[in-house]
Amino acid sequence: MARIDMHNWVATSLALGLLTSCFVPKYDEFESETGGAGNSNIGGATAVGGNSSVGGLTAIGGNTNVGGTSSTVPGGTSATGGTSATGGAGGSAGVGGITSVGGARATGGSINFGGTSTIGGASTTGGAGATSVGGNVPTGGSSTSSTGGANGGGGANGVGGASTTGGTGNTGGSRPTGGAGGLGGTSAATGGTSNAAGGGVTGGANPTGGSSTTGGVTGAGGTTSPPVPIQIAAGHQHACALLSDNSVWCWGDNAAGKLGDGTTTSSAIPVKVQLASATASVKAVTAGYSHSCAVFSDATAQCWGDNKYGQLGDGTTTNTSTPVPVRASASTPQSNIQSISAGAQFTCAVVLDSTSQKNIAKCWGTGSYGQLGTGVSCSNCTKYPSTVVTDTTNNTLLSGVSSVSAGSNHACAVLTGGATYCWGSNDYGQLGNGSTTDSNLPQRVLDGTSAAISATDVSAGGFATCALVNSGVLCWGHNDYGQIGNESTSMQELRAVPVTRAGNPIQSVIQISAGYHNACAVLTSGDVYCWGDGASGQLGQDLSSTSPGCASYSHCSSTPMLVNVLSSLKPNVKVSCGNQFMMAWDDSGSAYGLGTDFPSGQLGDGNTANDTNFTPVPLSKSWLNQ
């Protein structure tokens, strides 16, 4: 990606906002016209943001019960589908950050630009969906019924009950790993749909980390439950969603083909991504500044959109409006990808190292600020994934990585145990190491006492970063819009400081998302608090009302503000921030946009007016008309 001169970039395109702050490069800080999203989370928390982790254990299907003797059935009767199980505990989100809130949650992945990180909920025992007599049953013939397998923890796939005479058994199918990803961060969605042939059960979609929806009815003349969004990643001026039927849909600006529908035509309603042929289910999506990616359950990934700096990872610099596989080399697909996060003009992923059997971080695309973390700074560093190292002398790998989040021009990772590192651009202290010096090697994040922090999730935004620490939030970096959330008007914080209200740190936080100039946190109660830039309505506050203010601008807040307009989505709300807009959704399939709706239509409500929305507008369910 061309180096983004953030201070001039904002003039041509609204700041990139992937993580909670709606990661969008500052107008004057992106050097290129396609200024990187990355955790600038460009637009997405997709953002660019959290990392997604891989799902939970696979649960074995329920016991098969012997059914009674069926009566004479002319032609066979249709069966009512069983209910699907509640999604398993989500892993940390990767790209595009990103994860959902549901139930008691495990630590979700961080969200990047536009990405949302979620804390996957602990799954409950999936309901047994008893299959009824499937197919045609001969008169007087007996058919046994079986109970559908219960979904286990972590969105494990449950094996359906044994098929019976006259009817096929059901295969439970839910996807692992929770977490939504945005720009710079991915989260993996939990859930998935289980289907059965010939009178089997169609399980309801399991939302990320949350409760499953009611399964539809299958069989002759039956209908299935409509697909619902289980993860959304907000990027720069576009967003993408993973649906419960395993399809991916994107909307908004389509420069360079980042909607993935085979065109470069923008769309104010979701359009279906033409994913390359794959035998595995989609685990999570992420939206960066000008490209998007998806990671699959077989640990492969595909990306689409702008590829000027090789940020698609396919070994070329050719833009593509249809997804292409991420490759380790020209002849070898990159394997073992656990999560992925799209930033401004670069991408990072958590990859299982086959030698050490530990997770490492790999990045590709532009590295002009050192955001690839390889010890080298260059604009056209690599078109294939390159390993992040802590030193170049001994080539020591950053090992034990649980999540990674790509922001505007920097990236961060959380290791097993909580150690948090950042690398890349540091002009506003977004690396959190007490300096303003860029680094092409990972730097340990410090708190106000210069002690190393221990986090469970991290979300890299435009020029600030936030981390989930002990159910509270610490942020560092640029604070011109109050995006640090510490009730301060200081222009920058070089170390991690607590996000506070009336002097008290906010608590019971289960998800964070950092965007371009703002950030948000979701509490266990389902309350959503946001801080930073609100001039486009992305804080959910009426612009005619008084704003607490911040260092340099109006209609922004350095204090977390309760977003009352999202209360209808409680308690299982999830959010993903992009560039001057955010997306919010819940387990039932309700999804809304908030903030600026550019002519490209990044709120996905069908509106192309360049208007401001401080009350949520519903996402168009255009997939129902496919």
Image: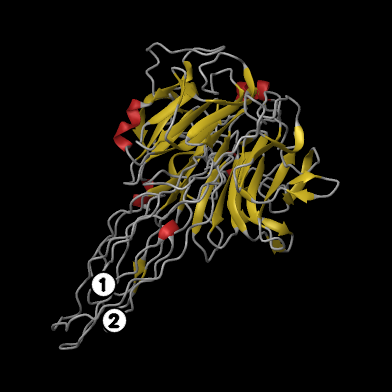
The residue that disc 2 covers is 164
Label 2: how many Cα within 10 Å (few below 14, some 14–19, many 20+): many
Q: Identify which residue is drawn at 20% across, 86% down.
A: 142
Per the image, label 2 sits on a secondary structure element best described as loop
Q: CA distance from mark 2 to mark 1?
A: 9 Å
| Residue 349 pos. (x, y %) | 63, 49
Q: Residues within 10 Å of mark 1 (few under 14, many from 20)?
A: many
Q: Are marks 2 and 1 in contact (CB under 8 Å)?
A: yes
The amino acid beneath tag 1 is: Thr
User: Can see residue 578?
Assistant: no
Q: Position of residue 499 (x, y in %)?
A: 51, 25
Tell me: residue 81, above or below residue 248.
below
Q: Is residue 417 above or below residue 517?
A: below
Could you say which is closer to the camera, residue 577 or residue 447? 447
Q: Is residue 81 left or right of residue 490?
A: left
Q: From this viewpoint, which residue is outermost toward the right?
A: 393
Q: Is residue 65 visible?
A: yes
Say above or below: 170 vs 621: below
Q: Which residue is mark 1?
A: 131
Q: Look at the image and tell me in which quarter the N terminus lies.
A: top right
Callout 1: SS:
loop
Residue 372 sits in which quadrant? top right
Disc 2 marks a residue whose amino acid type is Thr
